[in-house]
């Protein structure tokens, strides 16, 4: 699952790069929190397998995922303040938090077989 999260992180990184090149700093700030959860999963898996030589324990993975989802959702709420109108804020908040919750459930299901 780390490879899939790495691909999601690279895609979001390309989007952030293209927004930065187009001088759309508000959208850069709004796009970055979507990459926190997949990046946290990639980094935790890499650190555990490369440096510790073992698989990521299920309970540690669940804690890391929940903390990443919470941090990302808080950042989404803060970043929504940089958007100009409620017409942009409300869909951004709904879709951003929905993305985090769905990806978090998929990753939790992968690690602990929740669903």
Image (cartoon, rainbow, N blue to C red):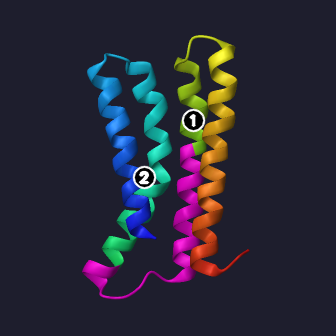
User: Few, some or many C-alpha atoms within 10 Å of disc 2 (few <14, some 14-19, many ≥20)?
Assistant: some
Residue 15 point in image, percent of width and height: 37, 35
In this rendering, is residue 33 above or below 20? below
Q: Residue at x 37, y 45 (%)?
A: 11
Q: Secondary structure at mark 2?
A: helix
Q: Tell whether position 53 is magenta.
A: yes
Helix, strand or loop under label 1 = helix
Residue sitting at the far bottom: 54
| Marker count (numbered) | 2
Residue in view at x 58 percent, y 25 percent: 80
Which residue lies most toward the right here? Answer: 115
Residue on which disc 2 sits: 8
- Please give the range of residues in magenta: 49-72
Residue located at (31% from left, 73% from top): 47
Of the image marks 1 and 2, the number of the one nearer the N terminus: 2
Q: Residue at x 58, y 75 (%)?
A: 110
- Callout in the foreground (1, 2): 2
Q: Residue 57 magenta-drawn?
A: yes
Secondary structure character of the magenta stretch overall:
helix
Tag of residue 44: none
The residue that mark 1 highlights is 76
């Amino acid at each position: 699952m780390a490879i899939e999260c790495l691909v999601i992180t690279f895609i979001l990184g390309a989007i952030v790069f293209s927004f930065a090149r187009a001088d759309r700093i508000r959208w850069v700030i709004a796009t970055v929190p979507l990459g926190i959860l997949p990046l946290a999963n990639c980094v935790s898996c890499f650190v555990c397998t490369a440096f510790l030589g073992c698989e990521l324990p299920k309970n540690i993975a669940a804690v890391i995922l929940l903390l990443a989802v919470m941090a990302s959702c808080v950042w989404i709420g803060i970043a929504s303040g940089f958007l100009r109108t409620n017409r942009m804020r409300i869909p951004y908040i709904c879709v951003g938090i929905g993305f985090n919750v769905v990806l978090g459930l998929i990753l939790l299901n992968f690690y602990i077989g929740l669903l």
